């Protein structure tokens, strides 16, 4: 069986000691192994700080953008192989796998183009020149430059390809050498991607650690930056990590999120907007088996439409075959690990205490094309809550699987916004309405609690990617429970890896500095 | 003796229990008392979250700007009284006191004007509309809106007036209700300012806690934001505070900073640029008795000019009278507290182990016009290090008083930048040179380690405020040791109190939302 190697200090090394086995979550067949340790991580940090940082510092944004374009091309070249790995190791249907792999290459391509636009410079202007003296001679100019340090990426199990690429695109374009750590259980796609990327990048620009993090964070120092996607328990551990506190290490966290979808009071279910709403809810429940941090977990519908919504969901979900995702007739695969299955079932049980069953009971399912008793399967589950705001399990706990809960409301926009807020901060929430005043009231009150607000309407329904798709051009991250981080959103996602500095002095000198950086 | 009251939940309350006495640091004469507790802080948070947040949410940026203009006017109206309080309670000379008080009103006025410019709206556009679909119909627009929660300000003892105003200007203009806590020892100016401000602001917009923080932070919740200025030990306590971690409370920290000043190899001491350099070093040592977070602590000069620089510093510092700052002939007062004196003397002793004395020995001084043995006085101290990079006490420990250390170098710009970096992140560093290539090399390499780089040159010498002055239009904050925070810098300082949200949907709806927010 393949023993996955880490790519550290310029070479591939398998590590040593005990091993963990990566399996196919549909069949539990073993796929590969990783060592649980045995790497010289201090040497890897030193390599990044010296070799990697130096190599990247010589490059302009345009040159770093060209590197990202090469990475995107490498993914395209190995697309089928990567998709197969995602299907085997991630429990992904082919559609899910494409979502992960193509999402990764599209994000790299987007940032490649952004790099070309930023041009042959190493300092980015932040805003216009500022007069700070009595005359225009004495001025100020804010600039962004790369931080000196190491970017450490700790990715989630659900998007091994896209997650790697979306973080890497921003840190590399910003100019920071990066050590990336995929989640162990689903690490095959990320491992293969780094095999493809390594020959295309300057030495030290990208290193890969497969297997457990071990002492990774103990080597952090001032100037370093850690970007994490995962659960809130790990997030809390990171926040309180001694080295992160001691050295004021920057921390970008993307954690739990109780994303809401709200049907406006004006929307007929048979309208374009109504169809979009239903399609988005069903897609978010079933795509990646609901294992998207952006997936809709809470659904609020006008009381008079609740019965119709529930009926429509029952009908659509009833037609979805669950099973081995390598089969063409299967629309939804298993969750990624035994632990995830356990957590999702526990979450459903918690919900069941405070809600009524609508579809799928508590998640039991007979998967198609799978040996008896094998695989980490949970079927799609819809629950129904009487009082949206009062239902604690609905609003306080993210069930990371194919599970959603529907609750009724009066149709009031301010209540809808309060319901978004009740999740204590989310990555994205969505509202479906063609009434502009309702939307304006909702947005004004809900915006502080969401990193993204998706506004479904008849005019965009035909070309909408749905709320569950994080786009490179729009911010990904959310306040409060969602961790408070900011990723993507064009240049916004690069700022975490850069230092904003105010330059103060003779205005003509400041002008020449922006020029001379090229 | 006056018992200072806190302004909480809409009324002034003196608290209860044991008390702390505020003294004149030059004479140790008691000035006022504060209670060490006895306040209902949970009620204060609730008042901010309900009454304060609601009041502020109804206001546009322009209206909130008008409030700030009224606060600035109130300071102008009570300017002499506030200056007297700063002289008595802060150990400030009249010049120091004006720096604090006028700095506060100028910052409020700056943000008042910014509010007027932002206009009659409640959402700020962040960048241009973005096309996210196949056609321009499906779009994205990033916006900034106020966070829902409480802004908690914990200010440092050295700038009770300016510190209050610079944080308050940003949080109020952003739209967050604020609870401000001045340092106890020097709280008289802040207390008087809030007495002036309270009648001018909507209920719940501003609350004041005088005395110890007590359980203040235990009431933090999601959506809240804490801005802290002070020492790194308290900063580390804040970073690891259970409530801050549990609720992902935003934290802006401005902590220790080993700011450097570098004399370029091209600069004659007798030139305009050379004079500016000397004036800036001496001002930063003596203004506020060196108790400025932005003050120059480390000075790097070309080896061949070191003797001349030391001689010039000796001469200038020799003419500075230290004593009771209420006297017109005194140019430098005491440090603020007995503890500060102890810390500064300990810092000098640490430096003395690794450096040579140049001026002022280890800080002993005979103050003018002060009863024998009274007051927290430390004289100006210049030390000299042989090896700038190797001198650990110089580069690892901020001595928060009238102390600076000079070290020689070859004149190489990259070494100068490495020396800035050796401080592990600073609020500001300065370089004095009229050679543009040297400056460009220095800026490129030093920028990642500084929140501001001040570039002294002949053309701006006549109108320069010096590196030690934080301006409302330029970023104040720095990476690494300096805490990683961002304050001021125009709108940049407001972002901490706002949520950035990506709006996604029909492009015409997004456009109307920005309009409808007005």
Image (cartoon, coloured by chain):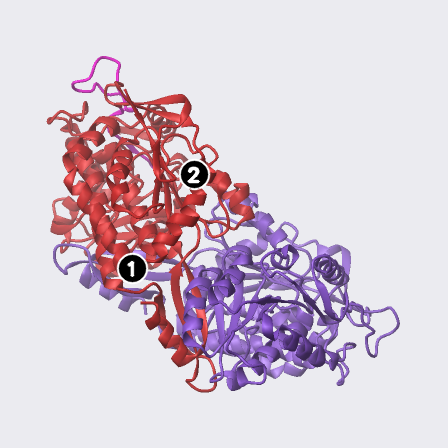
Chain colours: A purple, B red
Within the image, what quadrant is residue B309 found in? top left
Q: Is residue B25 left or right of residue A365?
A: left
For label 1, the SS is helix
Residue at image mark 1: B61
Within the image, what quadrant is residue A32 found in? bottom right
Q: Is residue B220 magenta?
A: no
Tell which of A297 and B111 is nearer to you.
A297
Q: Is residue A505 above or below residue A218?
A: below
Of badges 1 and 2, nearer the viewer stands 1
Residue at image mark 2: B232
Q: Residue furthest top?
A: B372
Q: Is residue A97 left or right of residue A243?
A: right
For label 2, the SS is helix
Q: Residue furthest right?
A: A372
Q: Circle 1 marks a residue in which chain?
A: B
Main SS class of the magenta portion in the image: loop
Q: Which mark is residue A127?
A: none
Q: Position of residue A333 (x, y in %)?
A: 74, 74
Q: Is residue A279 left or right of residue A499?
A: right
Residue for point 26% across, 42% down: B199
User: Is residue B418 in sight in this rendering?
Assistant: yes
Q: Circle 2 marks a residue in which chain?
A: B
Q: Is residue B49 above or below residue A473?
A: above
Q: What's the magenta region?
A: B359-387
């Amino acid at each position: 069986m393949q023993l996955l190697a880490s790519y550290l200090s310029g070479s591939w090394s398998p590590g040593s000691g005990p091993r963990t086995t990566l399996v196919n979550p549909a069949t539990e067949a073993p796929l590969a192994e990783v060592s649980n340790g045995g790497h010289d991580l201090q040497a890897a940090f030193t390599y990044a700080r010296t070799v990697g940082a130096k190599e990247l510092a010589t490059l302009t944004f345009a040159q770093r953008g060209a590197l990202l374009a090469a990475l995107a091309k490498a993914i395209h070249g190995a697309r089928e192989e990567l998709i197969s790995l995602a299907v085997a190791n991630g429990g992904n249907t082919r559609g899910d796998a494409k979502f992960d792999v193509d999402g990764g290459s599209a994000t790299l391509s987007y940032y490649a183009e952004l790099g070309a636009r930023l041009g042959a410079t190493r300092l980015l202007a932040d805003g216009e020149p500022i007069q700070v003296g009595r005359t225009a001679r004495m001025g100020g100019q804010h600039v962004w430059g790369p931080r000196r340090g190491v970017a450490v990426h700790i990715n989630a199990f659900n998007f091994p390809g896209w997650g790697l690429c979306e973080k890497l695109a921003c840190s590399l374009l910003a100019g920071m050498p990066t050590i990336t750590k995929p989640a162990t259980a689903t690490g095959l796609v990320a491992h293969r991607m780094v095999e493809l990327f390594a020959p295309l990048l300057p030495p030290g620009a990208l290193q890969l650690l497969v297997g457990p993090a071990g002492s990774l964070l103990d080597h952090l120092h001032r100037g370093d930056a850690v970007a994490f996607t995962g659960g809130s328990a790990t997030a809390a551990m990171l926040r309180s990590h001694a080295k992160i506190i001691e050295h004021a290490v920057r921390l970008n966290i993307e954690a739990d999120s109780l994303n809401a979808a709200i049907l406006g009071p004006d929307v007929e279910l048979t309208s374009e907007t109504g169809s979009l709403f239903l399609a988005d809810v069903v897609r978010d429940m079933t795509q990646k088996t609901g294992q998207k941090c952006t997936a809709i977990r809470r659904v609020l519908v006008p009381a008079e439409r609740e019965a119709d919504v529930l009926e429509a969901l029952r009908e659509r979900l009833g037609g979805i075959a669950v099973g081995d995702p390598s089969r063409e007739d299967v629309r939804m695969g298993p969750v990624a690990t035994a632990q995830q299955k356990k957590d999702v079932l526990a979450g459903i049980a918690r919900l069941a205490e405070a809600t009524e069953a609508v579809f799928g009971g508590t998640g039991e399912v007979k998967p198609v094309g799978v040996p008896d008793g094998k695989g980490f399967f949970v079927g799609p589950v819809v629950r129904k809550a009487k009082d949206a705001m009062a239902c604690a399990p609905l609003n306080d706990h993210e069930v990371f699987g194919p599970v959603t809960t529907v609750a009724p409301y009066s149709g009031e926009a301010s209540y809808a916004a309060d319901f978004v807020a009740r999740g204590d901060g989310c990555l994205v929430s969505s509202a479906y309405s063609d009434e502009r005043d309702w939307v304006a009231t909702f947005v004004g009150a809900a915006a502080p609690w969401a990193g993204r607000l998706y506004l479904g309407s008849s005019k965009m329904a035909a070309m909408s990617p749905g709320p569950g798709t994080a786009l490179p051009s729009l911010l990904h991250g959310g306040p409060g429970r969602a961790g408070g981080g900011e990723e993507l959103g064009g240049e916004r996602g690069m700022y975490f890896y850069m230092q904003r500095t105010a330059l103060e002095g003779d205005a003509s000198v400041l002008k020449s500095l922006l020029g001379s950086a090229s």
